[in-house]
Amino acid sequence: MATKPILTTAIQPPPGPAAKLALPDESGVNPPVFNDAMIVRMRVFVDEQHCSADAEIDEDDARSWQWVMYDPSPSPESSTPRPVAVIRLVPPPQPPHAVLTHAEDPSTKHLPPYDWTHEPCIKLTRVAVLPEYRGLGLGRRLMETALAWAAEHAAEIDAAAAQVAAQTELVGSPGQWRGLVLVHAQVDVERMYSGLGFVTDERLGQWDEEGIAHVGMFRRVEVR
C-alpha cells in the first residue's frame, strides 16, 4: 500500500492583469509558485494528455488562485522541493456554457464573454497530479484545501468578481458568491468528484475539450 509522503502546499494569489505569464522557464517572468504550477500542468495536460501547449495559459490564470503541492525530499535532478500537484480556483464570473458545448455554432460568437444571469459560482480546474504521485489522494487533498479556503474568503472572491464586472458592460451588482462550486470533470474522474460531494448536472450535457469528454458537476460549501 502506498504511503502518503509528507508534502507542503503553497498558494499563488491572482497575478493580476498586468502580470506577464508564460510557459515554465528560468527567465523569472512568472511568479515562482505559478511557474511551479505550470511545470505540473505542462507535464500532465500537454506531455501526457496531449493538450495544446498554446492553450495551457488562458485568460483565467491572471485572475485565479492556485495551490501547488511539493515533495520536499531531494531528487537526483534538484535539491529544491519538487512541485507534484496543482489546483486552480477561478472566481466568478464564468463564460456562458454554450461557448463550450457549441463552440462551432456561429451564434455563440455573439454571446457576452461572461454569464451574469445565473448564480455566481467559483470553478475548480486544472487539477493535476504527477503520475508517480497518484494513488495517494493528493487530488482530493488539494480539492479539500481549495474548498476550505474558499469558504473562509468569500469577500476576496466577491472582490475578484467585482473587478471583472467593472471592466465589462455589466449594469448593477454581479451578486455575492454564496458557496456554489463548479467543476468541469473529465468523465474518467467523475467518480472521484462524486466522492467529494459534487453532483453531475445532466442539463449541461457532455462536451469535448482537447479531445477529452467532460461533464459539469456542482456542490455547495458553507460560506463562513
Image: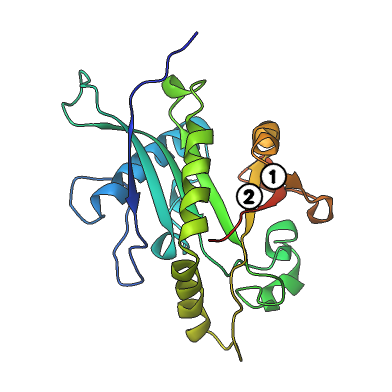
Above/below status of 98 relative to 175 = above
Q: Is residue 47 left or right of residue 109?
A: left
Look at label 1 and name its amino acid: Phe
Q: Secondary structure at mark 1?
A: loop
Residue 14 position, x and y percent, is: 37, 62
Structural distance between the alpha carbons of marks 2 and 1: 8 Å
Look at label 2 and name its amino acid: Val
Residue 35 position, x and y percent, is: 29, 47
Asked whether the beta carbons under mark 2 and mark 1 sit within 8 Å of each other, the answer is: yes
Q: Nearer the viewer, residue 56 or 218?
A: 218
**Mark 2 or 1, nearer chain start:** 2
For the point 69% across and 70% down, which residue is it? 119
Q: Secondary structure at mark 2?
A: strand
**Could you classify mark 1 by the number of other residues whose Cα lies within 10 Å: few (under 14), some (14-19), or many (20 or more)?**
many
Which mark is on residue 183?
Answer: 2
Above/below status of 164 relative to 189 = below
Q: Nearer the viewer, residue 201 or 47?
A: 201
Total marks shown come to: 2
For the point 62% across and 55% down, which residue is it? 181
Above/below status of 50 relative to 96 = above
Q: Foreground mark, 2 or 1? A: 1
Residue 29 position, x and y percent, is: 22, 56
For the point 20% across and 18% down, which residue is it? 76
Residue 205 position, x and y percent, is: 81, 51
Residue beneath label 1, please?
198
